[in-house]
Amino acid sequence: MKVSNMLKFRNQLGELQKHKIKIYATGGMMMAGTLALFMHNKDDERYKKLTKDQKLMYWNFFLEDGTHIKIPRPYDIGFVFSGIPELIANGIYTKNGEDALKDFVWSIKTMFSVGDISGLFQPVIEDMTNKNWTGSPIVPTYMQNLDDKSEQYMESTPLMYREFGKATGISPIKTQHYVDGYLGLTAKMIEEATENMIWNKKDWGDRPFAKDALEFLTYRFKGKEVEPRTIWSEKYYELVKKANGIKGSFDAKKKRAFKDGGADTREYMSEIENKSYTNVAGQLRKYNKLLTTVKTSIEVVYYNPKLTKAMKEKKINEAYAKKTEIFQKIVTDIEAKIKVLGE
């Protein structure tokens, strides 16, 4: 709070005033371009499936041949002049203010690092809460109760982490989370190089989605043909929390009935509530089994020596599309049952 520092700050404010017109002009062009792109994308099913981070951190262009080009947006000022206008426009168009508000709060925290913690502790905190920076669980719900933690891996989890998991019993997904969290892009380079070294081409055939040097440098600017992560998988994870809360309430009422001498649970809830509680738990079990089946089918394709790289990628993308359909069906079904409980 020295006088010299106060004078410096005043001078900096003066410089900011000089550049105000440039900032507004640049921001205005950014806003106009973003809204024009939104109007072009708003009815495109590929755009609708994108998660909030995929929408707000990139300008997304979908070419006629199906190619998805992603241009990273600048932080801070980019969010002010592109993220906020797009959130408002999307909220007005979809008439879903609740989702728009959630995306806005997430964006504020992510873009401006509000309440952020030191990078040294961030992977640890995320592990403890089982939630990464996008808000998705690190270990998917349908894998959390596996007795053998070395089986906690996705089809895309690099072999180096799976082998480490077999040797130690540690979750490969969590190991990758820590390595990626501390090494960032360097971790991706190590993973790609190690994957090529470990891959047994004789027994497993071609490796799907392998990247050469140029593809590795440009992959962040090109969307996948079928995205494994979609808005439906994100909504699924949110609904699982609600569903678990509902099941907890149901179990508490059953316990209360038992303590009251085995009274009928319907004395504490309506018949509609009773059925809805039971159905929510049943639906989760059903779909978790389906998701596990899809994961297994993708693994079978990955290591099939009779299939070419192109054939493997085609089948895997079809499985990812099927997975998205499952997530969408889960969300639709559970939302309907939760709505009944709310009424």
Image (cartoon, grey):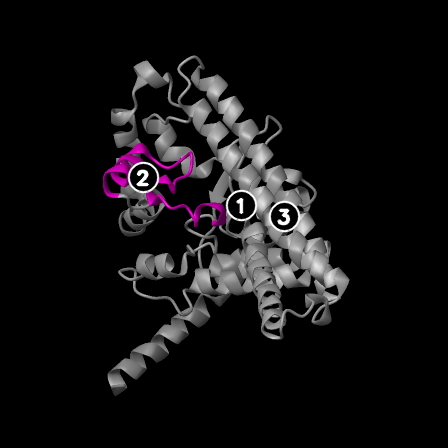
What amino acid is labelled 3 in the image?
Gln
Mark 3 nearby-residue class (10 Å; few <14, some 14–19, many ≥20): some
The vertical placement of 288 against 254, above or below, is above
Cα distance, mark 1 to mark 3?
36 Å
Q: Looking at the image, can residue 263 be seen?
A: yes
Q: CA distance from mark 2 to mark 3?
A: 36 Å
In reply to whether residue 233 is colored magenta, the answer given is no
Label 1 vs label 3, nearer the camera: 3
Q: Nearer the viewer, residue 246 or 326?
A: 246
In the picture of the structure, the residue carrying the numbered disc 2 is 188
Q: Amino acid at mark 1?
A: Trp
In the rendered structure, find residue 59 and report the number of the disc placed on it. Answer: 1
Q: In the rendered image, which quarter is residue 162 located in?
A: top left
Q: How far, Cα to Cα, is label 2 from label 1?
A: 23 Å
Badge 2 marks a residue whose secondary structure is helix
- Mark 1 and mark 3 in contact? Answer it, CB < 8 Å: no
Q: Residue at label 3?
A: 283
Residue 110 vertical position relative to residue 44 in the rendered view, above or below: below
The residue stretch that appears in magenta: 141-168
Q: Say which mark, if any, is on residue 301.
A: none
In primary-sequence order, the first of circles 2 and 3 is: 2
Tell me the residue at 27%/37% (across/down).
Answer: 166
Q: Position of residue 5 (x, y in %)?
A: 27, 81
Q: Nearer the viewer, mark 2 or mark 1?
A: 2
